Image (cartoon, rainbow, N blue to C red):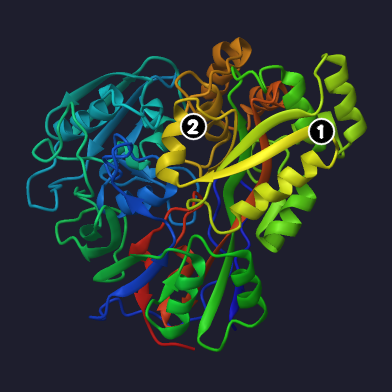
C-alpha cells in the first residue's frame, strides 16, 4: 500500500489517526540519521536578524526548528485534543474565572548543557517574550500579552496571573513562544541574533550555514531531556531545498527519506496516482488557511464596499480546484470547517460569485470603476503554486471590468516586514494555527497589536465578543460569540478567506511514525520518526 489517508474526527482537538503507517516497525536505534526535506528557507537579514528566537519567531517553518529544541510547560498530545503537561508535572486553573493558572515542574529538569531548569527560568522566558520590544515585531508577544504577573514558588512552582479570563491560555503555553530558555544564553532585553537556539527539548541542534542561509539543521537526541515525548531516533537532518522539484528528486534518489512542506500540487497528484514501490504518500486533514488581507487605511481599499465587491467576485471553488486540486477546499470563514464554532459567514452573506451584485455595491458607494490596486504575495514561503493562485485571483477580478489588478511577488524576508509596516494595500497570507481553537483564527487578525499589524478595529469584537468567548472553558459554549465575530468579519471584510488546505508527507517506506510527524498545526514532530523495515 503506497497511499495512506488518515481520517480524523471533525473536532476542535483532532484525535488519533484511524489508520497506522504501512511501513515496518521502527527500532529507533539506527546509526543513520533520518533526512527530512523542506522548502522552508531560513535567512538572517537586517529585517529578520533572529529567525529562531522565540521572542521573534512566528511562522510554521521556524517553529519547526523550535519545537524540536525548546521545551514548553504544556504540549498538544500525540493525536490532538486538549494540552497536556510537558515540562510541567501538572498544570491547571486554580480559580473559577480562568485568571489564575498554576504549574508544577517535573523533578530534576535540565537544559541541554546540564544546567538545572527551574521555575525562575520559566518566568524569565515568558516575561522576555511579553516585554521585549523589537523593530519589525512579528506580533508573537500577543500570545502572552494577557499575562499580568508571574509568581515563582520555589524551584518547581510557577503561577500565572492573567489580566482577564482566558480559557485558551493552556494552549498558548504549548506554543514555541512559551519555550523555556536559559538566562545564560538569552538576553532579557535583546534578541539572540543568527541561527543559534538551545533549550531543554528532545533535541540539540547544529546548523550548517552558507552565507546568510541555513542549509541544514542536524538534530541530535538530548540525553538530558525529561518530558512527554518519546524520542524514536538518535538523529534527524532537516535539509532545505530551493524548490519542491529539487526536494522531490532528492526523495526519488534516496538522498532524503521524507519530504514535507511544501510539495507542489503536481507532485501530490503524481504520488497519489503512481508513488513508486518504495514511497508512501500520507494525507491528513490540516488547519492551514489562506486569505487576502487589507490595509484598511489605504486609499484604494479604505471604503469597505471595495472589499465587499472583491468578496462578491472571488470564486473560491474554482480557485482551489484549478490551482491546488485535491490539496485544498474553499473556505468561507477565517475559522476552518473542522474547528468548533465554524460558520460559513462569507457564503451566507455573498452566496455564489456575482459580478452584478459587486457592481451594485461599488455603484451604491460612489466608487469609480475599474478600481486600480496591486495585490502582493510572497514567492518563497507558501509553496510553488502561490504565483498561479494570484494570477487566478487577478483574472477573476479583472474579467469583470470592475477591477484593474496588478500582482507583485516578493521574497518572504522582504514581504513580511513590508506588510507589517503597512506598505501593501492588499496582500496574500497563510495561517498555520498556534493551537486548534477558533480564538486562534480570529484574535491574531482582529485584536489589538495583531499579527498582521492591521489598523482594522471593531469595538464589538475587541471589547465584547473576544473576551466573552475566552471566559468559556467549554469551547462549544463559546460558539455563539465566535459565530458573531465571523459575521462581522464577513460584513467588514478586513480579511478575505480563500481556502483550507490538507497536509501531505511523502516518505520512503522504511520510515515509521510518519502519520504522527505533523501535528494539527502543521508543525513537525521529528521525535516520532524511526527507521524500520520497508514493505
Is residue 112 depicted above or below 51 in this figure?
A: below
Which residue lies at the image location 24% right of the left edge and 71% below the top edge? 234
State which tag comes first along the sequence, 2 or 1: 1
Report, in whole angstroms, how far the alpha carbon at label 2 lies from the one at label 1.
Answer: 24 Å
Residue on which disc 2 sits: 419
Q: Secondary structure at mark 2?
A: helix
Q: Secondary structure at mark 1?
A: helix
Residue on which disc 1 sits: 312
Q: Nearer the viewer, mark 2 or mark 1?
A: 2
Q: How many marks?
A: 2
Which of 121/119 is in front?
Answer: 121
- The image quarter in which residue 385 lies: bottom right
Which residue lies at the image location 37% right of the left edge and 41% below the top edge? 174
Which residue lies at the image location 74% right of the left edge and 51% below the top edge? 319
- The image quarter in which residue 429 lies: top right
Q: Residue 113 vs residue 40: left or right?
A: left
Locate residue 380, reporting x and y percent: 48, 53
How many C-alpha atoms fall within 10 Å of the one at disc 1: few (<14), some, or many (≥20)?
Answer: many
Amino acid at each position: 500500500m503506497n497511499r495512506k489517508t488518515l481520517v480524523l474526527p471533525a473536532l476542535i482537538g483532532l484525535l488519533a489517526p484511524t489508520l497506522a503507517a504501512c511501513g515496518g516497525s521502527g527500532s529507533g536505534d539506527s546509526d543513520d540519521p533520518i533526512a527530512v526535506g523542506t522548502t522552508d528557507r531560513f535567512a538572517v537579514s537586517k529585517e529578520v536578524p533572529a529567525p529562531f528566537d522565540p521572542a521573534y519567531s512566528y511562522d510554521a517553518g521556524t517553529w519547526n526548528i523550535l519545537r524540536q529544541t525548546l521545551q514548553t510547560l504544556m504540549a498538544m498530545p500525540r493525536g490532538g485534543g486538549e494540552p497536556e503537561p510537558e515540562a510541567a508535572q501538572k498544570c491547571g486553573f486554580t480559580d473559577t474565572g480562568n485568571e489564575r493558572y498554576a504549574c508544577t515542574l517535573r523533578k530534576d529538569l535540565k537544559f541541554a548543557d546540564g544546567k538545572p531548569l527551574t521555575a525562575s527560568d520559566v518566568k524569565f522566558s515568558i516575561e522576555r517574550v511579553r516585554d521585549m520590544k523589537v523593530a519589525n515585531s512579528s506580533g508573537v508577544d500577543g500570545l502572552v500579552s494577557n499575562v499580568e504577573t508571574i509568581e515563582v514558588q520555589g524551584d518547581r512552582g510557577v503561577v500565572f496571573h492573567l489580566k482577564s479570563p482566558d480559557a485558551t491560555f493552556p494552549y498558548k503555553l504549548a506554543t514555541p513562544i512559551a519555550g523555556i530558555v536559559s538566562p545564560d544564553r538569552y538576553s532579557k532585553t535583546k534578541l539572540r541574533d543568527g541561527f543559534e537556539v538551545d533549550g531543554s527539548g528532545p533535541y540539540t541542534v547544529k546548523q550548517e550555514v552558507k552565507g546568510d542561509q541555513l542549509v541544514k539543521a542536524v538534530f541530535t537526541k538530548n540525553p538530558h531531556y525529561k518530558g512527554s515525548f518519546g524520542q524514536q531516533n538518535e538523529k534527524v537532518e532537516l535539509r532545505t531545498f530551493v524548490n519542491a522539484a529539487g526536494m522531490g528528486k532528492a526523495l526519488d534518489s534516496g538522498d532524503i527519506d521524507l519530504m514535507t512542506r511544501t510539495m507542489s500540487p503536481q507532485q501530490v497528484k503524481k504520488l497519489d496516482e503512481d508513488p513508486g514501490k518504495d514511497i508512501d504518500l500520507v494525507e491528513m486533514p490540516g488547519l492551514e488557511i489562506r486569505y487576502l488581507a487589507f490595509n484598511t487605511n489605504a486609499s484604494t481599499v479604505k471604503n469597505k464596499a471595495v472589499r465587499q465587491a472583491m468578496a462578491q467576485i472571488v470564486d473560491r471553488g474554482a480557485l482551489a480546484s484549478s490551482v491546488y486540486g485535491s490539496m485544498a477546499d474553499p473556505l468561507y470563514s477565517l475559522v476552518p470547517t473542522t474547528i468548533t464554532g465554524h460558520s460559513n459567514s462569507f457564503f451566507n452573506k455573498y452566496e455564489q460569485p456575482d459580478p452584478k451584485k459587486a457592481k451594485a455595491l461599488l455603484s451604491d458607494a460612489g466608487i469609480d470603476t475599474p478600481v486600480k490596486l496591486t495585490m502582493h504575495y510572497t514567492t518563497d514561503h507558501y509553496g510553488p503554486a502561490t504565483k498561479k493562485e494570484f494570477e487566478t485571483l487577478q483574472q477573476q477580478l479583472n474579467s469583470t471590468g470592475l477591477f484593474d489588478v496588478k500582482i507583485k511577488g516578493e521574497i518572504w524576508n522582504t514581504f513580511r516586514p513590508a506588510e507589517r509596516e503597512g506598505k501593501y494595500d492588499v496582500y496574500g497570507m497563510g495561517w498555520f494555527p498556534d493551537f486548534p481553537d477558533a480564538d486562534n483564527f480570529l484574535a491574531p487578525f482582529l485584536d489589538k497589536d495583531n499579527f498582521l499589524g492591521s489598523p482594522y478595529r471593531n469595538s464589538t469584537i475587541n471589547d465584547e465578543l473576544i473576551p466573552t468567548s475566552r471566559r468559556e472553558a467549554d469551547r462549544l459554549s463559546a460558539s455563539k460569540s465566535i459565530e458573531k465575530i465571523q459575521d462581522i468579519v464577513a460584513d467588514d471584510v478586513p480579511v478575505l478567506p480563500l481556502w483550507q488546505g490538507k497536509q501531505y508527507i511523502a516518505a520512503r517506506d522504511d520510515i515509521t511514525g510518519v502519520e504522527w510527524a505533523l501535528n494539527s498545526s502543521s508543525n513537525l514532530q521529528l521525535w516520532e520518526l524511526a527507521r524500520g523495515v520497508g514493505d
